[in-house]
Image: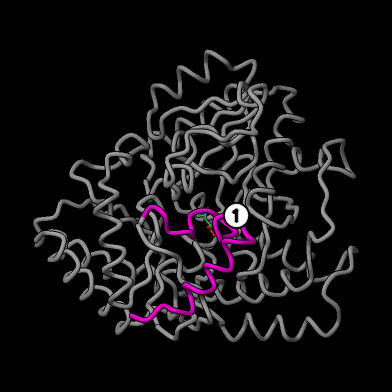
Amino acid sequence: MNTEQSSEFFARARKVIPGGVNSPVRACKSVGCDPLFVQQAEGCTIIDADGNSYVDFVCSWGPMILGHAHPAVVGAIKETAPFGTSFGAPTSLEVELAELVCDSVPSLEKVRFVNSGTEATMSAVRLARGYTGRDVVVKFDGCYHGHADSFLVKAGSGLITLGIPGSPGVPEDIVKNTLSIPYNDTQVLEETLRARADDIACVIVEPVAGNMGVVVPEMEFLQTLRSLTEELGIVLIFDEVITGFRLALGGAQERFGVLPDLTCLGKIIGGGLPVGAYGGRREIMDLVAPDGPVYQAGTLSGNPLAMAAGLAMLKVVRKPGFYSELEEKSDWFAGELAAISARSSVPTVLNRIGSMMTCFFVEAPVRDFRTASAADTKRYGQHFRQMLAGGVWLAPSQFEAMFISAAHDRTSLEKALAMTESSFKKLAD
Ligand code: HOZ
């Protein structure tokens, strides 16, 4: 495979951008190769700077649920751009998107748009602290809520991938207010919340973890989380940046029937443009400035191009049958993948819910950060490189999700399965 152009861009990038990338996992360090530079993408196909094409299972880390360059999304951006790209003033597009988002996500009565998932989680925590008058944030080991100071404790995504336990630059004074406990461990959860109830402002959780690889919550864990936080007056925040509009129109909260007080959104709601949002119960959201004293602002928040792209995407996913079709396709694909794993002597565990999944190179079930960390990352790296050489683009980390979009057709999925079978054979040799 010729990757000369990508190598040239990477050499230039490293001189002017830290690590040559604008987000660490993209550097492909943990899978033992250099990143490929993308030229263009359409549907489920992504093409690199040297013209090689791949079936894409990264989907921009989640947002591209319709596939790349969907005509409705591209059309909305083209229609909106000639009228101006930013005003720093309200537009009707924001109102329309807010109405659609509140109508779709069960627990949302009010929503505020920001520019990324990180901004959404950071703002939601500030709001929870303002609402309760308490400082402590409880999170779960291996969950990732963006890169704000309070969350960089035993965090997932790039931090597990690169083996970074925390980050220099995050003051000890901030970290002391973050408690990180094991995911899916109802007993530790109960002990922690009861012991520190008077100090805890909020619990923030990925209702399906997607940043230590996919880890599905046990129902008892989610239900206990809801009932305990309610009993103790602690704000429950669902980080649905990945699962929002992915697992159902109303996200994981709709799928599991467990409603948080606040929800953070990102990725899909922007149609591939930079958008995040946080929202929830009216009583809490009314504390946000200018109605209330909790400050949060942004020049580009509610940006018209991003709102138009998000609206176009949400209108498509709201069509009847969208999620059942995606579920059926993902079900079939995951079944075939599991069959390949079962035929292979390479031990793997497939964790999957809806159109997101992770194939862990590990023997024992993966239900938390500890069990995910047992995965053989060297073997994943080899698999990643073999798949890439065969024209399949996976996440460059064992600890991320694989996404299926509406644009993945049978031919592309079959190609990926055939490549998986052949990669597993090579791994077994
Ligand atoms: N935190 C993102 C994945 N969960 C990585 C995004 C990126 O590198 O673009």
Q: The residue under label 1 is which amino acid type? A: Pro
Q: How is the image coloured?
A: one colour
Q: Is residue 283 above or below residue 190?
A: below
Q: x and y percent of residue 384 in the render?
A: 31, 63
Can the viewer see residue 404? yes
Q: On the rendered structure, is 262 left or right of 378?
A: right
Assess whether residue 174 is covered by the magenta stretch: no
Task: Pick whichever, 64 or 238, lies toward us.
Answer: 64
Q: x and y percent of residue 148 in the render?
A: 65, 41
* Label 1 crowd bin: few (<14), some (14–19), many (20+), radius 10 Å: few
Label 1 SS: helix
Quarter that holds the N terminus:
bottom left
- Please report the residue visible at 59 percent of the width from the left and 17 percent of the height from the top: 197
Q: Is residue 134 above or below residue 36?
A: above
* Region rendered in magenta: 1-30
- Please report the residue visible at 63 percent of the width from the left and 39 percent of the height from the top: 261
